[in-house]
């Protein structure tokens, strides 16, 4: 140690010592660079996942908006359909009466039957859409960890609509 210091002045390092220090610093720099790259990659992956989640949430919000519109439309159509069904039931009751002129009414009955079949097909299609929505909603609830069922979420959406419409 006494050979390293001469009257408080540090002896200059030899080229070999400088080379060893440069090698050590280079390895440390590579290690730090690798760690930086790993952390950057991790942050980028998280950012991509967050972006994907954001897009999925936007899709769910759009789906809920469409569902809300469908429910509102169904609420409007339901009384009309109920009225048509009552009319069909009255027509069938009238046709079952013994003195009813069946032959003169036959053409109109076919068109009403077609309308009723179309109504049933639309109802079947809507039920299939609701089944798909229910599966998507269950997957969303499982993903988000909410303890509510899909019907609760839909009813909450409906409550929000009703409260907005109230004066």
Image (cartoon, grey):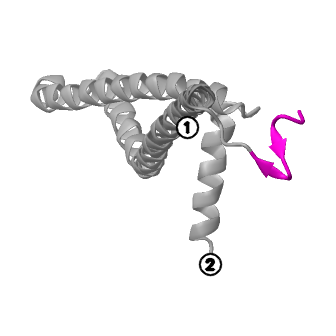
* Residue 149 counted in the magenta span: no
The label nearer to you, 1 versus 2, is: 1
CB atoms of marks 1 and 2 within 8 Å:
no
Q: Position of residue 92 (x, y in %)?
A: 33, 27
Image spot of residue 167 (x, y percent): 62, 78
SS at mark 1 in the image:
helix
Whichever of callouts 1 and 2 sits on the residue coming sooner in the sequence is: 1
What's the CA distance linking mark 1 and mark 2? 48 Å
- The secondary structure that most of the magenta stretch takes on is loop
State the residue in front, 128 or 120: 128
Which dot marks residue 121?
none
Q: Which mark is residue 167?
A: 2
Q: Position of residue 138 (x, y in %)?
A: 60, 25
- Give the residues in magenta: 1-10
Foreground residue among 39 and 12: 12
Residue at 54 percent of width and 28 percent of height: 30
Using the rendered view, name the quadrant where residue 146 is placed: top right
Q: Is residue 151 above or below residue 135?
A: below
Q: Is residue 123 left or right of residue 45?
A: left
Q: Which residue is mark 1?
A: 43
Q: Residue at x 26, y 24 (%)?
A: 117
Count numbered badges in the picture.
2
* Secondary structure state at the residue bearing disc 2: loop
Q: Is residue 9 magenta?
A: yes
- Residue furthest right in the image: 2
Q: Nearer the viewer, residue 107 or 135?
A: 135
Quarter of the image that includes the N terminus: top right
Residue 97 at least partly seen: no
Q: Residue at x 31, y 29 (%)?
A: 122
Residue 49 x/y as whole percent = 51, 34
Front position in the image: 32 or 4? 4
């Amino acid at each position: 140690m006494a050979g390293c210091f001469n009257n408080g002045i540090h002896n200059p390092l030899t080229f070999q010592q400088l080379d060893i220090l440069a090698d050590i610093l280079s390895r440390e720099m590579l290690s730090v660079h690798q760690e930086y790259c790993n952390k950057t990659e991790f942050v980028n992956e998280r950012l991509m996942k967050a972006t994907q989640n954001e897009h999925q949430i936007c899709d769910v919000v759009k789906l809920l908006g469409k569902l809300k519109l469908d429910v509102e439309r169904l609420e409007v159509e339901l009384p009309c359909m109920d009225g048509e069904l009552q009319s069909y039931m009255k027509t069938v009751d009238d046709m079952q009466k013994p003195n009813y002129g069946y032959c003169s009414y036959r053409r109109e009955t076919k068109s009403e039957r077609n309308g009723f079949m179309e109504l049933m097909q639309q109802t079947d299609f809507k039920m299939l859409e609701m089944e798909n929505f229910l599966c998507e909603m269950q997957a969303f609830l499982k993903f988000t960890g909410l303890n509510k069922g899909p019907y609760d979420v839909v009813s909450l959406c409906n409550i929000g609509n009703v409260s907005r419409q109230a004066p």
